[in-house]
Amino acid sequence: MDALTWWVAVIAALMAAAWYLSYNAARLDRLHARVEGSLSALDAQLVRRAEATLELANSGSLDPASALILAGAASESLEAHDERAGYQRPGDDLLEGQLFSGREVAESDLTQALQIALTAPVVEQLHDDPGLAGGPALARVRAAALRVQLARRFHNDAVKDVQRVRRKAVVRWFRLAGHAEMPQTIEFDDELPAAVGD
Amino acid sequence: MRIGIVCPYSFDVPGGVQFHVRDLAEHFLGQGHHACVLAPADNDTPLPGYVESVGRTMPVRYNGSVARLNFGPVTAARVGRWLERGEFDVIHLHEPVTPSISVLALWAAEGPIVATFHTSNLRSRAMQAAYPLLRPSLEKIAGRIAVSEDARRTVTTHVGGDAVVIPNGVNVDRFASATPRPQWQGTDGAPTIAFLGRIDEPRKGLPVLAAAMPQVLSKYPSARLLVVGPGDAETARERMRPEVAAASEFLGAVSDEDKAALLASVDLYVAPHTGGESFGIVLVEAMSAGAPVVASDLPAFLRVLDGGRAGATFRSEDAEALAAQIVRLAADPVARAALSEAGRRRARVFDWSVVAEEVMAVYETVTHGADRVRPDGADTRWTRLLRGRVRGGDD
């Protein structure tokens, strides 16, 4: 082979390598964007769930003990959210520093408070009596709690995809992930109270 | 919300996925959303206004059966143009791992993408071979839906990750409001039993029911078996014992209204399926119409029947056990009425209004803060080139 052929072969190989790298970088970038999107969706639905729970607690349709339990758990959840938001400046990368950490406990607590307070007779009463202000609030709690489940599941799916791609040799060797932290799955109890689920 | 739905299977022939897509789209349109369906269809097939055709299909052997699908560069270009024109907030692909317009749309789109997995018997070989190719585009799916627990298991084992289970919807009211017809109603001592499904497909279970019938007939000689479904009736008749064949009426394929009326009329609906069912929509239809259900104990059926509370079950392929259940229920109108009532209540869970609300929750979750769906930026130059060239020869 003469020198020219060699040069052409080398340049072709380099171009193929460059294409492969940029393809993988773009793929990872898209995955990171998906994780950020799903995390912010989860965040929004958690806030909505806590706010709807507060509304239900303050509607006067529940007994005062249940209302206190719900209000307590809901404000813990909102506080955990605000604390996190305090660290964050607008434009910050959501993934930076794994800002969700620590909220799992507050969210599991709220889930359990909802399970304790929203027993079958309570839910039935809220459904059947249109005069109670808690009915619409309960519907909002249900809608938000359902979306929390979806958002968490979609987020964890996205996280697993990112983790898998970032384990690839080409991504590690060429540091295609940059400084972005490795996202982690988010685990907490998000089961709907049985009486609300159906 | 602007919703784009992609159906891989041709609208020329009826099928579970096509009905699912149609009902979903019509429900969202009824709620005031903008919904548009992209599906294959022949030029002369009449289509509802919201369906756009990508042209005729070819029969392809895939995943163990022959499916009518379309693909290739011309189709890919059409899918790309549909995406560009549609300006969708979300696109919803059905069966994204079939060689079809679903996978083409997944390839070509970027943005909020939802995918529904219907099949529960995906062959792993085809998947594994195509995996490296499919993987990066499967990563684009922001929300995965499975229509049943079995379909979900297929997703977790073959695709990876998880999926939320949102069952198939049924228009419960259409069945609940059906009026019974005297010719299909049983009398005391002459109960009517319905079977629905392809009569020449053994896994739909007609042979099991036929084997159970002699025992039923010895107790109720004038019992009638009403068989609804496509297939060769003469062959099926020949395979039955003479007395069973004499007691059977083959009605062939019937319209939706006739099916609803039949289910509202009969004393029992029997689902003797032996396997391969991932959901059992026909059970929900029967329950909606108020027919007491006797079904084989397939996992999918047990879930639909709420663990057996909304219908009687028997061990799959056990004709003796089936006969015992039929005889027991034929003798007990109170038990039948209780099953009918429990079934009607259970069916509500599968109504489109409930199901579509959950699908909408998925759309809202994946579109949260996201841009619209757009054609993939990474290969615009290629697609533009391709589209330009194909358009020249196409239009």
Image (tube, coloured by chain):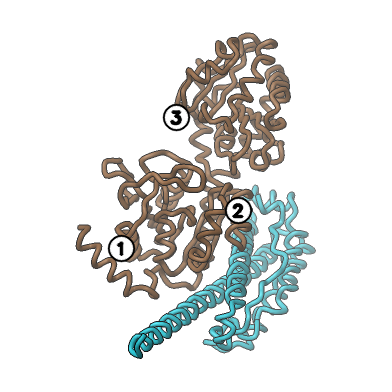
Chain colours: A cyan, B brown
Which residue does the numbered mark 3 point to in the structure image?
B257
Q: Position of residue B232 (x, y in %)?
A: 46, 23
Sequence-first disc among 3 and 2: 2
In the depicted structure, whether residue A37 falls above or below residue A142: below
Q: Are marks 3 and 2 on the same chain?
A: yes
User: Marks 3 and 1, how far apart in space?
Assistant: 38 Å
Tell me where residue B208 sits by quadrant: top right
Front position in the image: B215 or A102 = B215
In the depicted structure, whether residue B216 falls above or below residue B336: above
Which residue is at 43% across, 56% downward?
Answer: B102
User: Marks 2 and 1, how far apart in space?
Assistant: 32 Å
For label 3, the crowd category at 10 Å Cα-Cα, with few meaning under 14, some 14 to 19 and many 20 or more, is: few
Which residue is at 34% across, 50% downward?
Answer: B50
For label 2, the crowd category at 10 Å Cα-Cα, with few meaning under 14, some 14 to 19 and many 20 or more, is: many
User: Marks 3 and 2, how far apart in space?
Assistant: 34 Å
Which residue does the numbered mark 2 point to in the structure image?
B154
Report the chain holding disc 1.
B
Q: Position of residue B298 (x, y in %)?
A: 67, 38
Q: Judging from the image, what secondary structure is the residue with disc 2 in?
A: helix
Front position in the image: B123 or B254 = B123
Q: Are marks 2 and 1 on the same chain?
A: yes
Q: Position of residue B37 (x, y in %)?
A: 38, 53
Give the residue furthest to the right. A65
Residue B232 is left or right of residue B73, and the answer is right
Q: Are marks 3 and 1 on the same chain?
A: yes
Say what amino acid the circle numbered 2 marks. Thr
Q: Judging from the image, what secondary structure is the residue with disc 1 in?
A: helix
Report the chain holding disc 2.
B
Which residue does the numbered mark 1 point to in the structure image?
B81
